Amino acid sequence: TEESKKKSTMLASRLLQSSTKLNTAKATLTRLLSTKEPVVPRILDRKAGETGPGGRGSDAGVKVAVFGASGMLGRYVCTHLGTNGHMTYIANRGDDLEMRFLKPMFELGRSRFTFYSPRDRDSIAEVIADADIVINCIGKYYETKALADTASFPYFEYKVNYTYKETNVDIPKTIAELCTELQVDNLIHVSSINASPDSSSVWAKTKFEGEVAVKEAYPWATVIRPSQMFAPEDRLLNWFANAAERFPAVPLFEGGHALTQPVYAVNVADVIQKIVDDPEQFEGKTVDCFGPQDYSYKELAEFVYDITRQDAKLADVPRDVGSIIGKGMNLLGTPMLTPDQVNLWSEDFIPEMTQEEYDALPTKDKIYTMKDFGIDAVPIEKIAFNYLHRFRVGGHFVDAPGYH
């Protein structure tokens, strides 16, 4: 009968709930009795103060402010924060509708978009507000520009809006100082594995200076240093595919012999989410994120064109010649190439140690890697086809017999 079916369903539901509670109790007891402190935070465990059914429909009891949320890494960070029920304050420099693509990542009412100006300290403080954790993902591969009036012909000029120093040093420093003033519990700062005072790239130099400035203003900051990131929105693999369509020949600076070790942007976001889950454990620490294999830029180009089947001509371009080309293209609003990018791609963009050397570091000087978080680096071969096949003439459907 219908009544007996309802009773059976209710009984099965209660048994399932009891089983789940028992398993949770066993796992909790095991962890309490364990003498080994895990490196990897357990995101699936319910936190103290967390309410709701779990996941995006819950309240994790932690408020997170994110700067640079609209960038490639920032959007994946927001996806994780929304999935795990964090109340997220998202900083935006324009109308919040410009970042409306982030809204579906959160449950209704679990995100707040706040306007700010990077040069207005008070507006940055409004974004941070009562946040428990602040994440800074701000970054730009070129110096943004705007048209300005002049008194003589041609009566206008290009004026730099935000320099590398402002983007990579001044703004992160201001955020770190405000985190100290507002007594924010934790700060996560995204830098670069290529950050170095000795680099010929201004971008890499200012990334290093930004790290130093953040550490001075907020010594407990956790610094994330990813290598070049790839994802559907990247400017690495997509750059080669776009260059084949726009340039008569694709430039390989200094022969394209410099090495890079690309990391999947989602993996970096995974690391950040695990730190958000247990930030105190990683206070003052550095985390290097890199892929499983290094490639020369020439190898990356050949890999991309093997997928896209573009008839691209590769040209060996000296750094000086590439810088001249970059200066011309840098006049565009969103430049395909800049002189600084030429310098950056003429140097190795790889971690300073092997994974074995990272593992052998003493606890005092420990630099974490994705391996310490239980995250296996995803190789580009598993992801690249998903967003590069669109550059094929006819897409991947041309391989389907009888499709056309």
Image: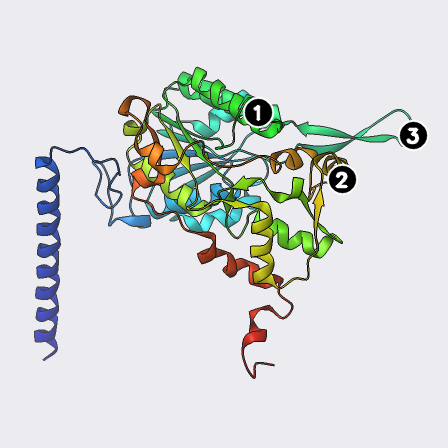
Disc 3 marks which residue?
Answer: 153
Q: Secondary structure at mark 1?
A: helix
Residue 292 vs residue 28, the one in the foreground:
292
Q: Secondary structure at mark 3?
A: loop
* Residue occupying image coordinates x 29% and y 40%: 60
Disc 1 marks which residue?
Answer: 205
In the visual, does 192 lie left or right of 278?
right
Q: Residue 335's image quarter?
A: top right
Q: Residue 317's image quarter?
A: top right
Label 3 vs label 1, nearer the camera: 1
In the visual, does 22 lie left or right of 63?
left
Decide which of tag 3 and tag 1 comes sooner along the chain.
Answer: 3
How far across and how far down the image is residue 76, in percent? Answer: 44, 46
Q: Secondary structure at mark 2?
A: helix
Asked if the residue under mark 1 is in contact with the one under mark 3, i.e. CB atoms within 8 Å, the reply is no
Quarter holding the N terminus is: bottom left
Decide which of tag 3 and tag 2 comes sooner along the chain.
Answer: 3
Q: CA distance from mark 3 to mark 2?
A: 25 Å
Disc 2 marks which residue?
Answer: 325
Q: Amino acid at mark 1?
A: Lys
Q: Amino acid at mark 2?
A: Ile
In the image, farthest residue toward the right: 153
Quarter holding the C terminus is: bottom right
Label 3 vs label 2, nearer the camera: 2
Q: Amino acid at mark 3?
A: Phe
Please rate how many residues cluster around mark 2, counting C-alpha atoms within 10 Å: few if below 14, some from 14 to 19, many from 20.
Answer: some
Please rate how many residues cluster around mark 1, counting C-alpha atoms within 10 Å: few if below 14, some from 14 to 19, many from 20.
Answer: many
The answer to whether residue 235 is visible is: no
The answer to whether residue 98 is visible is: yes
Asked if the residue under mark 2 is in contact with the one under mark 3, i.e. CB atoms within 8 Å, the reply is no
Decide which of tag 2 and tag 1 comes sooner along the chain.
Answer: 1
